[in-house]
Image: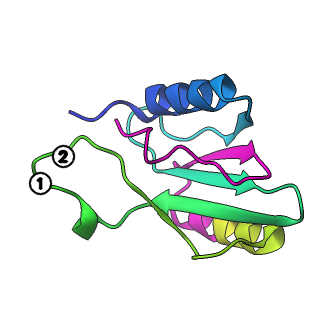
Amino acid sequence: MRLKSSIWVAAYLRRCQNEGIFGAVRKRGAEEAGAVFIKVALLDGNAMLYAPAPQTVYDESRPAERLFAPASPQPVPEQSVEERLAKELRFDPDAWIVETEDRAGRHFLDLAKA
């Protein structure tokens, strides 16, 4: 069974805080199962966006795990990330948006599986 989105987001933000990275919920989504998007602002006008991974990459032996995929291989201008997030919210108004700020681009999503 997968953790509720609200619990996962709280744990993720705690992890960021423990590493000295500022993070906040920009848009609260559905408590139980809203999709979570993570924006990592690099504080130079660029950002990375991590979106829920496609179902095809999930491991059937670990169905409760949350996996993320970068929306682009390299940082892009923050405006591009904002445009993508606006499209995602039009498609799924129950989605969460979490934003962190880290010049090094650390995201901890490989460690934040739940």
Q: Is residue 113 visible?
A: yes
Q: Residue furthest front?
A: 104
**Classed neighbour count for the residue bearing mark 1: other residues with Cα under 10 Å, few (<14), some (14–19), many (≥20):** few
Q: Is residue 21 placed above or below 96 in the rendered structure? A: above
Task: Report the magenta residues as a range.
Answer: 87-114
Q: Is residue 89 visible?
A: no
Residue nearest the observer in this picture, 84 or 69: 69
* Residue 50 horizontal/vertical position (percent): 55, 59
Residue ID for mark 1: 60
Q: Residue furthest right?
A: 44
The quarter holding residue 3 reads top left
* Residue 12 horizontal/vertical position (percent): 54, 33
* Amino acid type at mark 2: Pro
Q: Residue at x 66, y 71 (%)?
A: 84
Q: Is residue 109 left or right of residue 65?
A: right
Residue nearest the observer in this picture, 25 or 58: 58
Q: Is residue 80 placed above or below 69 in the rendered structure? A: below
Q: Secondary structure at mark 1?
A: loop
Q: Which mark is residue 63?
A: 2
